[in-house]
Every structure is written in C-alpha cells, then in structure tokens.
Image: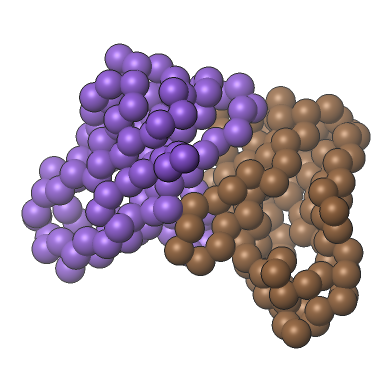
Chain colours: A brown, B purple
Amino acid sequence: TQLLEQSPQFLSIQEGENLTVYCNSSSVFSSLQWYRQEPGEGPVLLVTVVTGGEVKKLKRLTFQFGDARKDSSLHITAAQPGDTGLYLCAGHHQKLVFGQGTRLTINP
Amino acid sequence: NAGVTQTPKFQVLKTGQSMTLQCAQDMNHNSMYWYRQDPGMGLRLIYYSASEGTTDKGEVPNGYNVSRLNKREFSLRLESAAPSQTSVYFCASSDRWNSGNTIYFGEGSWLTVV
C-alpha cells in the first residue's frame, strides 16, 4: 500500500505552460519534502514544509502543505525544459516515506 | 566536496551470486540509509542506521544485510542475489534520523540480476 500517492505519474507539456503536481495521503505528516531527480543521479532536496497551510516559493516553483498536513502540491509557472525530471514527495510519518514520483517532461 | 559516494555504479550478477555495495559519506552525518528505486514504486527503504553502531530494517529488508562499519561507511550485502533484486540502489545520509533534515543521496548503483 502506497502511503503517499502522487498524481499525475507522467506529465508532458510545452514550454511556457503551468502545471501542478499533487501528493496525497490519509496520514498526517510532521513534515513533507519535495525532491527532484535527474537521470543517472540521486534525488536532490528542493524544499521542506513543516506547518499546515505553509507555502514556499523557489523561483517559479510554489510548494504548499495542506492545512491538515496530509497533502501537498507543487506548482510550476512557465515551465522550462530545464524543469524536466522526476519529482518525488516524501513525508515524515514515523519514517520517511516516498511517493512513487511524477515524471515531468517539458518540450521546447 | 564528495558528499555520498557509492560503488559500484553498475553491476550484473547471476542468480545466487553475492555482492556488497559500498557507501561512504564525508559530511559527518549520523544517519545513513539504503533505498531501492523501481519504476512506479518510488524509493523504498531497505535498511537504515540511525546512528553509528545501530542498524534497523526498513520497508523491504528481505534478502539484504547491512553493516555500519564506522560513522562514514554503510554497506549493503546481497547474500544470494535474485532477479527480483534487479533495481537501482541509493545510499543516503542525513544529520539525524527522521528529523525532517535534508537527506543527501549518492548517484545510485544499477544492479541487474540474471
């Protein structure tokens, strides 16, 4: 049973479009992280959110932690080819658990 | 700064063979981890070491053993490899266990069992 469900699993869009990736669970997390992974490399941390309702921005990326700390979203504005990669959410619930990932492709 | 270094990068094994994946971190982290990554499954924790001298099972420990050799090094051993263990393996470390700290990953080891 996947504790964290990410959607969509695959997303291919054109450069300049906006997108949102979702990370959902029935469990409450003490904190939630988003990682980005490029081919042939390990995941790299983008952000950690701790407080319910928290919003963090990283240039064109906006991360939100749900009020109940059960879900999170990642919104990318004006996507660029350099945003291509696998995006993983990970929640701290007794142990750190990862979602299955969203493979994002931005086409020029 | 090397961060987390794991070897080998690629390995092909025959069913029943054994091998050890080596991992070292140079960030003076207390906690180290071994994950496997399979398509559509995300990252699943195999074993972890919250601190030097301790190791614990994660989600998918069967068929694996680990050794926390010292604070820097954490190895993963497959005693009798099976095709189901074909995967990409990641070693990782963090300052403290389950604290919301950043987890730093190695570049991965691609293992194929035939």
Q: Is residue B65 left or right of residue A51?
A: left
Give the image location of residue B86, x and y in percent: 29, 60
Residue at the image point whose x is 28% and y is 21% from the top:
B70
Give the image location of residue B88, x and y in percent: 37, 57
Q: How many marks?
A: 0
Q: Is residue A78 left or right of residue A9?
A: right
Give the image location of residue A88, x and y in percent: 63, 52
Quick one: which residue is furthest to the left in this view? B17
Q: Is residue B57 left or right of residue B17?
A: right
Q: Is residue B112 depicted above or below A43 in this figure? A: below
Residue B36 visible in the picture: no
Residue at the image point whose x is 45% and y is 63% from the top:
A40
Quarter of the view holding residue A54: top right
Quick one: which residue is furthest to the front in this view? B1
Q: Is residue B98 depicted above or below A7 in this figure? A: above
Residue B29 visible in the picture: yes
Residue at the image point whose x is 75% and y is 85% from the top:
A108
Residue at the image point whose x is 68% and y is 40% from the top:
A33
Give the image location of residue A38, x and y in percent: 56, 62
Quick one: which residue is furthest to the bottom in this view? A108
